[in-house]
Structures are given as structure tokens and as C-alpha cells.
Image (cartoon, helix red, strand yellow):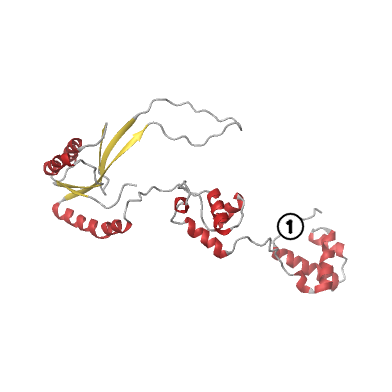
Amino acid sequence: MATIDGRTLDHKTLEHIRIQAVRRVIEDKEEPSEVMKSYGLCRTSIYPWLREFKEQGWDALAESIAQGPEPKMSEKQKDRVKRWILGKDPRQYGFDFGLWTRRIVQQLIQEKMEIELCLTSVGKLLASLDITPQKPLRRAYERDPQAVKLWLDETYPGLKKRAKKLGAKIFFLDEAGFQSDPPLARTYGLKGETPVVKTSGQRQSINVISAVNARGEFWAATYDGKLNAESFVLFLQNFMKGVRARYSWLSMGILRIPPKQWRTMWRAWRVVWSFIVYPPMLPI
């Protein structure tokens, strides 16, 4: 009969086997070797159980789980580390890098708590705090969260009512630039020899201005160079040609237009019959 490895059994099962095996030997006068053979366990395992029963009684056979080494950090200190990370970035603590890493957390714990942890322990600590590595979203530090909430809760609902009354459509407009040289991610290569990925040495870029509404209606145009008042007027004219509505309201970020071009911007508003709304948030 194959012997069962007792380490594969759970604590409750082992406790039950210990108590029953010792009872059969003490009360039923069975041979220890025969008792262990019936359970499929190692013959010598019962003798330490018998010694513990003789010295401490039945309580010695109860389930006991090793506590392990004393933790280096208290629960209060762990919560403090969690408060450091959530909603903040390392630059607020004097670091040059804006993303959290295990090494930065390790250094911060060393500096503020004088506790030394290896990187593996730091990773386990973060996992126990439900902090996982994630790709962050970009947010401009200039944006005002209170103004954004006010615009979403009060200003925008009011605009929707006015647009419905006038038969207008509300579009959200923004501009962006794209380049043909994406950043390289990680790959595999021989240790000590950095792999080489051949790419084009030419750099290509294109600018895009686009508008979309809540119903999924979309308009876009590409252009070279910088966006100025003249080109913006042309964009608005083309936009109004492609939108079937009596009025179209645009919600967009504030453009940096020099004062000498303000007259052209005013002409754009008059030509396209659009109502331009500036939300208090930036695109990122």
C-alpha cells in the first residue's frame, strides 16, 4: 500500500487522524504500526503524537498553525504606505519619476520608517493592500475638478435643454497630433546583448481636428502645420456643411489665438452660426 504524504492533507483532516489514531492505541489497544497502516501514513508519525498526548493530553493533538516570523510592519504602517500611493505620485515625495515602482516604495519605507524590505517583500506588501501594477490615465494638473463637476452637473444639462428646444446638436471638438514612430516595448534577447529592431529613420506626423456628439455622429479633418484662426474658420465652415442641423454647438478646449487674430475668430462664429462652449477640463 502506497504511503500518503501527510503534508498534502488539510489541518482539520490531520487533527481528526491524530485524535482517532491515538484513541485506537490508548483505548482500543491496537498496535501503532497497524493503526498508521490503516490510514496509509508513515508508521513512525504516530510516536510523536503519543508522546505529546502523554505530556499534555488531548489538547496537544488539536489543530495548530505555525505563526511564522514576526512581521516587520504593523497594520498601521501598512495603511500609511497605502495612503502614500493612492491618489498621489512619487514626485510629491521628492522623486523625479512620476510612476510608482517597487524600488521607489522600498526607498520611501526605508527613509520614513527605517524599515528594510527586499523588492519581493515590497511586492507582497502591495498585493496585500490590493495595489496592483496598472497603466495610468493621463490627467492635466491644470484642470479644476470642482469646475468640471459643476459643468457636468449643472452647465451641460442646461445646454442640452436649450439645444433640444432650438433643434441644435452639441458636438465635442478637439485636436491631436500623431507621429509614425511609436515607442518600442520590451522584447527578448540574449543576456548581455541588447536586441536591435530596425525601423525607418524618417519621422512623419499629421494633425487632426475632429468633433463627435453623444449619438456617435463624427466629423474629422487633417492638416499640416499649426492651427490658427484662418484655418479654424475653414474647419468650422466644412464642419457645418457636413452636419445636418439648424444649429451646431461646439464644446472645445480654449485655443491659444494671438490678439491680432481675434477678429477672424469672431468672424468664424458669425459665419458658421455656431455657439462655442468652453468646458473647464483639458483633454488629458
Question: Is 65 above or below relative to 245?
Answer: below
Say which of 260 and 68 sits in front. 260
How many numbered badges does the structure rendering display?
1
Question: Is 272 above or below relative to 55?
Answer: above
Location of residue 264 by image quarter: top left
Say which of 15 and 132 sits in front. 132
Query: Where is mark 1, residue-wise?
Result: 7
Residue at 36%, 51% (x, y): give it: 141
> Is label 1 in a helix, a strand or a loop?
helix
Answer left or right for 36 relative to 194: right
Answer left or right for 1 relative to 266: right
Say which of 84 and 182 sits in front. 84
Percent across and percent down for residue 233 are 17, 38
Percent across and percent down for residue 7 are 73, 57
Placement of the N terminus among the 4 image quadrants: bottom right
Location of residue 243 by image quarter: top left
Answer left or right for 268 relative to 19: left
Percent across and percent down for residue 160 are 21, 55
Q: Amino acid at mark 1?
A: Arg
Residue at 24%, 56% (x, y): give it: 156
Q: Residues within 10 Å of mark 1 (few under 14, many from 20)?
A: few
Percent across and percent down for residue 158 are 20, 58
Say which of 253 and 84 sits in front. 84
